[in-house]
Amino acid sequence: AQSVTQLGSHVSVSEGALVLLRCNYSSSVPPYLFWYVQYPNQGLQLLLKYTTGATLVKGINGFEAEFKKSETSFHLTKPSAHMSDAAEYFCAVSLPNNAGNMLTFGGGTRLMVKP
Amino acid sequence: DSGVTQTPKHLITATGQRVTLRCSPRSGDLSVYWYQQSLDQGLQFLIQYYNGEERAKGNILERFSAQQFPDLHSELNLSSLELGDSALYFCASSSMQGGNTIYFGEGSWLTVV
């Protein structure tokens, strides 16, 4: 079975500072990896995903993530935080060829951006 | 707008009651998923249907059931409700290929009092 660990349930950064949200996974095979964002009172929106190919993945709103197999990590970064980035971020995995394409989520990281 | 529609958006009901949550997937998506989001359990996968058939089951209680209809909409039935069932219930949809994006609706807030 696969699992996801997000280090830090709350992360606070200043506007303009680097955003780094950490995600480590456990899986018997290289998984597909996803980052979703949830704004208050809204559903989950896909930021980016890694399936195969280039390990550095660029997503929406200036976010990117790098798949590091040796470290079983898929950390999310953004060079310069905006106030509008304040939200909860979820890392998720699914297994290739898994019959359900089911996502297993981490516990989430709430990002706060200070002016 | 993800294209996944869920109704109702909010629901308050008493313990012991039964409710039905409804989901319309994105146009063309054959696969529907249900997730529960609560403060103590986080985001938990409940169940998945593909083209009307159950495909995968997660941490779904026996009091809960779901189905997907020929027009591909899905319903999640929650019965004998308990206070602990209060949560945000998400529906999501995707096409079947592995790695394809799963699109989430805005959720149905269930409060059991």
Image (spheres, coloured by chain):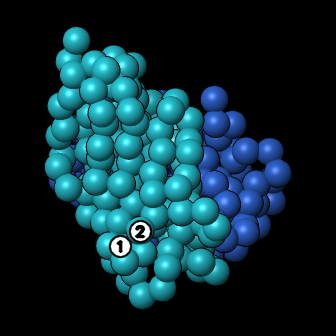
Residue type pointed to by label 2: Lys
Which mark is in front, 2 or 1? 2
Chain given the colour cyan = A
Residue B71's tag is none
B95 left or right of B39 in image? right
> Does residue B52 appear to the left or right of A14 in the view shown?
right
Q: Residue at x 28, y 19 (%)?
A: A15
The reply to whether residue B88 is visible in this rendering is: no
Q: Mark 2 points at which residue?
A: A68
Can you give x and y, in whole percent of width and height, for residue B72 in the image? 75, 55
Do the residues indicated by labels 2 and 1 lie within the same chain of the protein?
yes
Mark 1 Cα shell of 10 Å, populated few (<14), some (14-19), many (≥20):
some
Residue receiving disc 1: A72
Look at 72% across and 67% down and name the residue there: B96
Q: Where is residue B25 in the image (x, y as percent from the top left)?
A: 69, 47
A47 shown above or below B50: above
Mark 2 in CB contact with mark 1 (< 8 angstroms)? yes
Disc 1 is placed on an element classified as loop
Chain with blue colouring:
B
Q: Most extreme residue toward the top, as rendered?
A: A115
The subunit carrying tag 1 is: A
Q: Position of residue B36 (x, y in %)?
A: 38, 53
